[in-house]
């Protein structure tokens, strides 16, 4: 968040991430798609970030946490299939 010009404490950032992850789990969709993002944007905006910055931070966070793991998983499946 500091890179995006928003001063937010580490505890507040961890709390926003945790609450948005729980909101995503409550959506009952794979990876919490939709619910986690909406909660994260709303909480970041409520914490003082501009809406555009909150959206950008959410996209970056989801790319680094969710989609990076998905890409690693797909790569592992492809490697394991080649072994057979």
Image (cartoon, grey):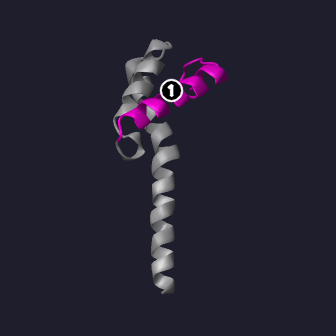
Q: Nearer the viewer, residue 59 or 27?
A: 27
Start-end of magenta stretch: 1-28
Look at 38% across and 24% down and name the residue there: 52
* Residue under the image location 57 percent in, 29 percent down: 3
Which residue appears farthest toward the bottom when viewing the image? 84
Q: Which residue is mark 1?
A: 19
Q: 11 left or right of 63?
A: right
Q: Quadrant of the N terminus?
A: top right
User: Of helix, strand and loop, which one carries label 1?
Assistant: helix
Please say if 12 is above or below 68. above
Tell me the chief SS of the magenta region: helix
Q: Is residue 62 above or below residue 4?
A: below
Q: Position of residue 18 (x, y in %)?
A: 54, 30
Q: Position of residue 42 (x, y in %)?
A: 40, 20
Of 62 and 32, nearer the camera is 32
- Residue at position x 46%, y 56% in the image: 70
């Amino acid at each position: 968040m500091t890179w995006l010009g928003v001063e937010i404490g580490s505890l507040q950032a961890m709390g926003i991430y945790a609450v948005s992850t729980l909101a995503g789990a409550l959506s009952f969709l794979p990876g919490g798609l939709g619910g986690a993002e909406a909660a994260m944007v709303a909480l970041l905006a409520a914490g003082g970030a501009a809406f555009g910055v909150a959206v950008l931070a959410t996209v970056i966070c989801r790319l680094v946490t969710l989609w990076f793991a998905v890409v690693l998983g797909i790569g592992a499946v492809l490697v394991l299939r080649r072994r057979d």
